[in-house]
Image: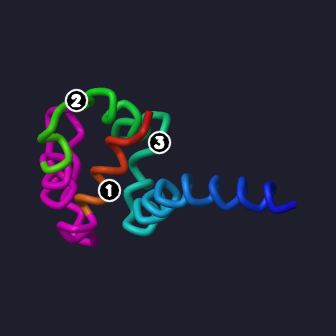
Amino acid sequence: MKRALLIMAAMAAISAPAMADEALAKSKNCMACHAVDKKLVGPAYKDVAKKYAGDAKAADMLAAKIVKGGSGVWGAIPMPANTQVNPAEAKKLATWVLSLK
């Protein structure tokens, strides 16, 4: 019984940060245009993670794009600035996106 509880606690601890950041993305309306594993209006988050894998500056660059918006990297449709997201939240979201595989 104790072992089952420990396993469940470990699983919750491992998945909690990812779920919390997905919850932040949902609460900030990011999921209206993006999904984790498929293209919607914008690219899938897993595609973003793959594109910027190994780029040490990617989290800061993506955080800036979340706050200010951007265009031309993923096609003709621009990403508008997200005025609901502050810089700390943008960095948290960017780090989460880059962690996806």
Contact between labelled residues 1 and 2, with CB atoms less than 8 Å apart: no
In the picture provided, is 38 more to the left or to the right than 57?
Answer: right
Circles 3, 1 touching at the beta carbon (< 8 Å) = no
Counting residues from the N terminus, which is met first, the one under dot 2 or under dot 1? 2
Percent from the top left, x then y, of residue 46? Answer: 41, 34
Residue 16 rendering spot, x and y as whole percentages: 54, 60
Compare residues 34 and 8 and report the one nearer the observer: 8
Instruction: Give the residue type at disc 3.
Output: Val
Check disc 1: other Cα within 10 Å, few if <14, some if 14-19, many if 20+: many
Say whether residue 88 is magenta: yes
Which residue has dot 1 on it?
Answer: 93
Front position among marks 2 and 1: 2
Instruction: Indicate left or right for 12 with 16 as reference.
Output: right
Give the quadrant of residue 56.
top left
The residue depicted at 52 percent of the width and 58 percent of the height is 19
Colour pattern: rainbow
CA separation in Å, label 3 and label 1: 12 Å
Q: Which residue is mark 3?
A: 36
Q: Main secondary structure of the magenta part?
A: loop
- Amino acid bearing label 2: Gly
Q: CA distance from mark 2 to mark 1?
A: 17 Å
Q: Determine the secondary structure under disc 3.
A: loop
Q: Which residue is mark 2?
A: 54
Tell me which segment is drawn in magenta.
Answer: 61-89
Q: Position of residue 42 (x, y in %)?
A: 34, 40
Instruction: Tell which tag, 3 or 1, sits nearer the viewer.
Output: 1
Query: Is residue 42 positioned above or below 52 on the image?
Result: below
How busy is the neighbourhood of tag 2: few (under 14 within 10 Å), some, or many (20 plus)? few
Q: Secondary structure at mark 2?
A: loop
Q: Who's the residue at 35% across and 45% down the image?
A: 97
